[in-house]
Amino acid sequence: ILLKMKLWQKNYNVDKEIEKFTVGNDFLLDKALVKYDAYGSIAHANMLNKIGIINKNELQKLKKALLEILKLSNSGKFIIKQEDEDCHTAIEDYLTKKLGEIGKKIHTARSRNDQILVDMRLYSKENLLETKKALIELVAALLNFAEKNKNIPMPGYTHTRKAMPSSAGLLFGAYAESFLDDFGLLEAAFKLNNQNPLGSAAGYGVNLVINRELTTKLLGFEKTQNNVLYVQNSRGKIESAIVFALSKIMEDLAKISNDLILFTMEEFGYFTLPDKFTTGSSLMPHKKNPDVFELMRAKSAIVQANLFQITGIASKLISGYNRDLQLTKEPLMNSFEAAISSINIMNLITSGLKVNKENCIKAFDKSIFATDEVMELIKNGIPMRDAYKKVAYNIKNVKKTDPADNINSKKHIGATGNLGLDKAKSKLSKIKSETYKQESAFISIIKKLER
């Protein structure tokens, strides 16, 4: 007696321990992919209708049933069991039970290999857009913070030692500009991901005259990924490109976290973190801990590890699909969750962070103005190396100047007196406009599929 039917079922049952091992937690992860699998199946059914595999009535019934699955999934009522293996089997079983022979036709010219690729491409596209939208809000908050506090001086550090006068505006403007560069990485990953893999089947095509361009249009992909074998080989490669972009964002968040852990310490007190953003100790009543920053720092390491995991899996395989690729799904999903949640949390923190101007100014000592004094000597015609030595040999005689006057005197591009925040805001505005165009196009495609 055969147990639960697999899409690959033969005249035998797989050993239960083998089944458990090979399925892993895919049946749990795939809850997040049901809607994308349904969208891919609607597009595929339309294509099968166009090439005469199913008729108009069968198409309508399939689409109606797939929309039912969408509704069930959205309400948490579409169940994927371990014996299903994945969302593809659960969906096809639902269609077959409901529609009989019609349901059996949905998988024509398709493999689970190109199915999961479609799912992950659509999942990644939507989550890349969510990442970009969240990052737009964070960069805007950082730029506003920099603008508001651009005239508040604070020590700048190299080698964790006081170096030269800086400002709160310079620090937060630096964070914002780094994230603006990260948008370039996100956009490159978005473009790489925006290719339709459907129709590649198991990586070698099929001997039916399928219309891949039609499903590309229906699913809103920028182009059809051409070589059917490369479609399979690109799994893991594209995921790693996405996670690389996310890892750079997380590195930036970790740097901000490190800075603010340090600068909110009582010994510095340059910034104050609101009590509601801190957690306490079960033993020490006075503790107000920056756990949120410490966890963000750790999540950055996790995303970097996810990148290593994906590249390690994908780079050791021969051409064609290999089951190893199943294990690239979870690190990608985890990376999106870590990045989006961390971006949103940093945005929340930025809205409540306060600068302690008095503590910032109090931290200035005479030595921090030494380099500025060298520059003053140069203005009077003294060669750089002679000016350096003169100040270095008489460091106790360096004059302390007004920190606010000092930072505002530096007017070259990008310095404390000329932060170029308007340029950054203009760049962000263009990114925002393009991102919302991409989102609008994606939403439009989804609405058409659901009609």
Image (cartoon, helix red, strand yellow):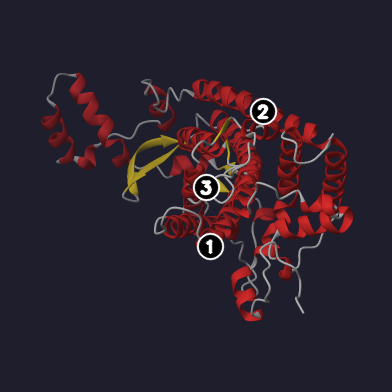
Q: Residue at x 63, y 54 (%)?
A: 112
Percent from the top left, x then y, of residue 173?
A: 49, 33
Which residue is tagged 1? 323
Q: Residue at x 21, y 41 (%)?
A: 395
Crowding near pointer 1: few (<14 within 10 Å), some, many (20+)? few
| Apparent side of residue 363 relative to residue 196 in the rendered image (left or right) | left
In the rendered structure, which disc, 1 or 2, sits on the residue that comes first in sequence?
A: 1
| Label 1: which secondary element | helix
| Apparent side of residue 93 relative to residue 27 in the rendered image (left or right) | right
Which of the numbered marks, if any, corresponds to residue 436? 2
Q: State the CA–CA distance, disc 3 to disc 2.
A: 36 Å
**Residue type, numbered disc 2:** Tyr
Percent from the top left, x then y, of residue 72?
A: 86, 53
| Label 2: which secondary element | helix
| Apparent side of residue 302 relative to residue 162 in the rendered image (left or right) | right
**Rendered view: 326 above or below 252:** below
Which is nearer the eye, 66 or 62?
A: 62
Q: Quadrant of residue 408?
A: top left
Which of the numbered marks, if any, corresponds to residue 204? 3
**Residue type, numbered disc 3:** Tyr
Image quadrant occupied by the N terminus: bottom right
Crowding near pointer 2: few (<14 within 10 Å), some, many (20+)? some
**Residue type, numbered disc 1:** Arg
Percent from the top left, x then y, of residue 237?
A: 46, 48
**Rendered view: 386 above or below 96:** above
Image quadrant occupied by the C terminus: top right
